[in-house]
Structures are given as structure tokens and as C-alpha cells.
Amino acid sequence: MRKYTAYRQGEERFDGQLYRIMVRAEQKARENPRVGIPQQPPVPEVQEPKPETPTVICPARQVMNIYRELEAEREREKLEKARQILTHKAEIVAKYLKKHESQYRSPQALISEPRSGESVRARKRNY
């Protein structure tokens, strides 16, 4: 490509043939703007659902997920065992209280029942 130095410093002037080639290419691009761009298929109005492909999980993440599941299972077992123990203790306490409810009365019951000849203030001092 030949260049000619312009009259002013910093400007460049190209030869006529190269200029005509450039102008012709620009005109063709304006007339047919899709030249060189691959055509896309028309987009249908109703999109078809794409089949779900299973996501690829890296082996380290799979191991981590398995470890989390095992930890959660252990935690559930531990909570279930604690629940069973508490249920058993509550049953034993209920049986014990049923047998001995006449002997052991709650402090609230003692305060609420007036004793013969005793004031409320005196009862509170005793507790």
C-alpha cells in the first residue's frame, strides 16, 4: 500500500485505487449488513422446554455432600436418642408423682391453702 505524505505534518493521503476499494466495501456493507455474520435461526414464539441435563459435580463436592449427609444423619440419631431418654424420664416422674402425690405437695399448693390460725405473712416467712 502506497502512502503519500500530506501537505500538513501528521496527515496522510492514500492513493486513489485503495480509496475506491475502501469506499466500495463500505457501500456493500451498508447495502447488505449481514455479510460475514452467520444467520441465526428464527426464534419461535413458544419456547420448547429444554431437556434437563444433570449438573456435573466435581468429586470433591460429592465427597463433601456425602459427609454432610452423614453428619446430618448422626445429628438426627443423637436428637432422637435424647428425645427418647427425656420421654422415659417424664414417664417415670409421672408414675412417681401419681403414687406419692398425697405425700408431696407443691410449694404453691402450700401457700395457697390457708392453715388454721396462720396469717399469709407468717406463711411467707416460713418459706
Image (cartoon, helix red, strand yellow):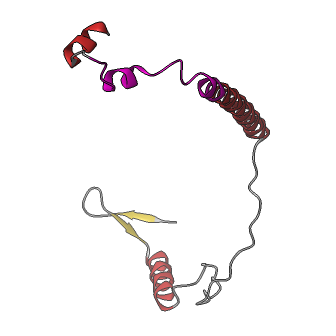
Residue 16's x, y, as percent? 43, 78
Please tell me in which quadrant of the rendered image residue 62 appears: top right
Which quadrant does the C terminus fall into?
top left
Q: What residue lies at 37% left-to-right and 21% top-to-bottom? A: 110
Question: Taking 59 as reference, is 26 left or right?
Answer: left
Question: Taking 74 as reference, is 94 left or right?
Answer: left
Q: What residue lies at 73% left-to-right and 39% top-to-bottom? A: 65
Q: Was residue 104 drawn as part of the magenta stretch in this picture?
A: yes
Q: Residue furthest front?
A: 116
Total numbered labels placed on residues in the image: 0
Location of residue 69 with respect to 81 vertically, above or below: below
Q: Which residues are magenta?
A: 93-116
Q: What residue lies at 51% left-to-right and 85% top-to-bottom? A: 33
Q: What residue lies at 74% left-to-right and 32% top-to-bottom? A: 77
Residue 82's x, y, as percent? 68, 27
Residue 100's x, y, as percent? 59, 21
Q: Pick the residue in front: 29 or 98.
A: 98
Location of residue 68 with respect to 101 vertically, above or below: below
Q: Pick the residue in front: 27 or 11.
A: 27
Residue 93's x, y, as percent? 62, 24
Q: Pick the residue in front: 44 or 5.
A: 44
Location of residue 123 with respect to 20 vertically, above or below: above
Q: Was residue 37 drawn as part of the magenta stretch in this picture?
A: no
Question: Taking 8 as reference, is 24 left or right?
Answer: right
